[in-house]
Amino acid sequence: MKPSAVEIFIKYFAWLCGLLLMSASILIISYLLFKGVPGLGLSLIFGDTSPVDAFLLRRQVLTGLFPAMAGTCLLVLLAVGIAIPVGIAAGIYLAEYSSGDIKSFFSLIYDILAGVPSIVIGLFGFSLAISLHHYVREIYPCLLISALALAFLVLPYLIRTTQFSMESISPEIRLTAPALGATKLQNIAYVLFPRSLPGIASGVILAVGRCTEDTAVIMLTGVVASAGIPGSLLSSYEALPFYIYYISSQYRDAYELQTGYGAALILLIICACLFLAAFYLKNRLINRMLYRQ
Amino acid sequence: MKKEYFAEKGFLGAAILSASATVLILIFMIFLGFPLFRDGQFYTLLTTSWNPDKGLFGIYPMLAGTLSIVFLSLCWAFPLSLGASALISVIAPPGFSKFCKKTVQMLTGVPTVIYGFVGVFLLVPFIREMFESGSGMSILSASLMLSMVISPTMILVFTDTFESIPASYSAAADALGATPVQKFIYVILPYSRRGIFSGLILSVGRAMGDTLIALMLAGNAVAAPGSILDSARTMTAHIALVIAADFDSIEFKTIFAAGIVLYLFTASLILLVRIIGRMDMNSR
């Protein structure tokens, strides 16, 4: 039987779409490599300061990306540090202690939080800062506020990955410890939690990736174009993705533009590495995490 | 057991704390934007234009900008994603389909700001040369790049849906001698209607919530757009741009209106996906 016209059309259309998507992504990445690779090097990161001096904070790096990278690192550590304990505990509650209506209520609320646009979370962080400013004069949009807002942004990821990886443990394993007389908490602490660590870890890595790339939240909560290394939790800071955004609209000369390409390439490499790590840890759960609803 | 009790309460506390974040965000915005809600001003804001010289601070142009960019980007991304996920799930040979899927998964990890950056230096000049109008920063450029951002997510949702059809359906089609394409048209597609719809809604939410692409590529003009080559400002970009203004001004209050609209819109999209999911469960 000869295939009908519709079938032939769909077949070619699908191939066309696939190739279009592939070539567009190859175009974007190779453009970045082509423009960015020539500028890569120590001077891109440290300017004319020596790396040792920069790390020991003996001299300020003025022209390189070092302050932006340091700012991003601190920000991510702080944000994920705030989000991990709360997120994992909430995930455990959802997987092990709740059921029925309460469970579906909580997961609806977390889905909504996951869907809130990041700029709105940024706006929340900003409102929080100006409200607190009435009581504590020192608080302006700053590193701490950004970290808090970013923690809100990644909480749903952590909760979901914890919940899914705990729920996907097979009943045989789940029932062994209680059959031997272990309490619920012991079962969680010695069996279920260790078992789901790979899944949780990949969720944590994805959360780190989200914090690293997010620009909208930090734009409203304290990132600036030049601040040096942040001195305290209440000071403003630089960050890599914001630097890329800033350069794209405000670059003054070819050198700055070149730094911008370099920064974009570095960010892409960091995110790709994080992504591969998460992937390596667990790729069964991964699609649901990537939906990013 | 005291320890058991406290552990459970601790986990519950964390769950409540996280849930309260969702509510807190909305409350803060309503609280700070409160003056807007008196005398039905909120509704007027959504329908009037933005012209500070005349004392008009409506966010209608941003609403129109958001809707047109989202709509146009879905026009590119939806067929593309449907085709690509058909390729991955059914049509391509196994090796190539696996490679495609891996690539798509990697693409979801590419930072949005990088798409924006490449867009500014690659897509915008191209659009400018091609249509010889304005700066090239337009709804068209933003929607094209935005479709690159939302497609990978949509493809993953679609392929998951396509692959979740019951084995008996698939086997029945094979037994009747259907080719893969025929199986896709007559079995998989009808079965995945709701999944496709959910994927589409999720993508609307993502496209709407995206800030960077529109901020960097759409030009941010405050007039309501007239054609796809016009520059436009989305609500998200509006929030990012006005933040520096004076805290007490009405101009500043409008960003809370934009924030509330975005929040409520994305929340209702999530609810809709939920309801579709329920219907799906009941119908099986």
Image: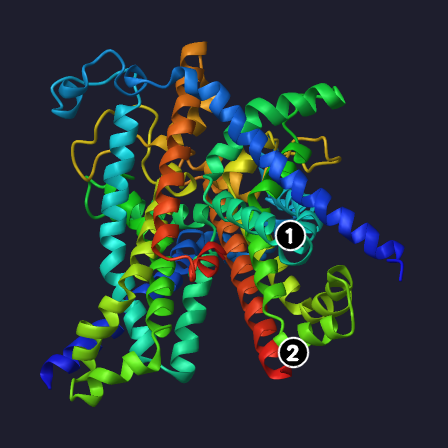
Q: Marks 2 and 1, Cα distance to the nearest angstrom? A: 22 Å
Element under disc 2:
helix
At a point 67% along the width and 68% down the height, the residue shown is: B192
Mark 2 lies on residue: B168
How packed mark 2 is, by other alpha carbons closer than 10 Å (few <14, some 14-19, many 20 or more), is few
Q: Position of residue A11 (x, y in %)?
A: 76, 51
Mark 1 lies on residue: B93
At a point 26% along the width and 24% down the height, the residue shown is: A66
Q: Name which of mark 2 and mark 1 comes first in the sequence.
A: 1
Q: Toward the viewer: B227 or A59?
A: A59
Element under disc 1:
loop
Query: Quadrant of the rendered structure where residue A119 is?
Result: top left
Q: Is residue A48 above or below residue A277?
A: above
Frontmost of labels 2 and 1 is: 1
Tally of marks: 2
In this picture, residue A241 sits left or right of residue A196:
right
Q: Is residue B181 above or below residue B254?
A: below
Q: Position of residue B262 (x, y in %)?
A: 53, 53
Task: Say if residue A228 shows up in the picture.
Answer: yes
Query: Quadrant of the rendered structure where residue B149 is?
Result: top right
Q: Toward the viewer: A159 or B16?
A: A159
Quadrant, the N terminus of chain B: bottom left
Labels 2 and 1 touching (C-beta < 8 A): no
Callout 2 and callout 1 share a chain:
yes
At a point 15% along the width and 78% down the height, the residue shown is: B6
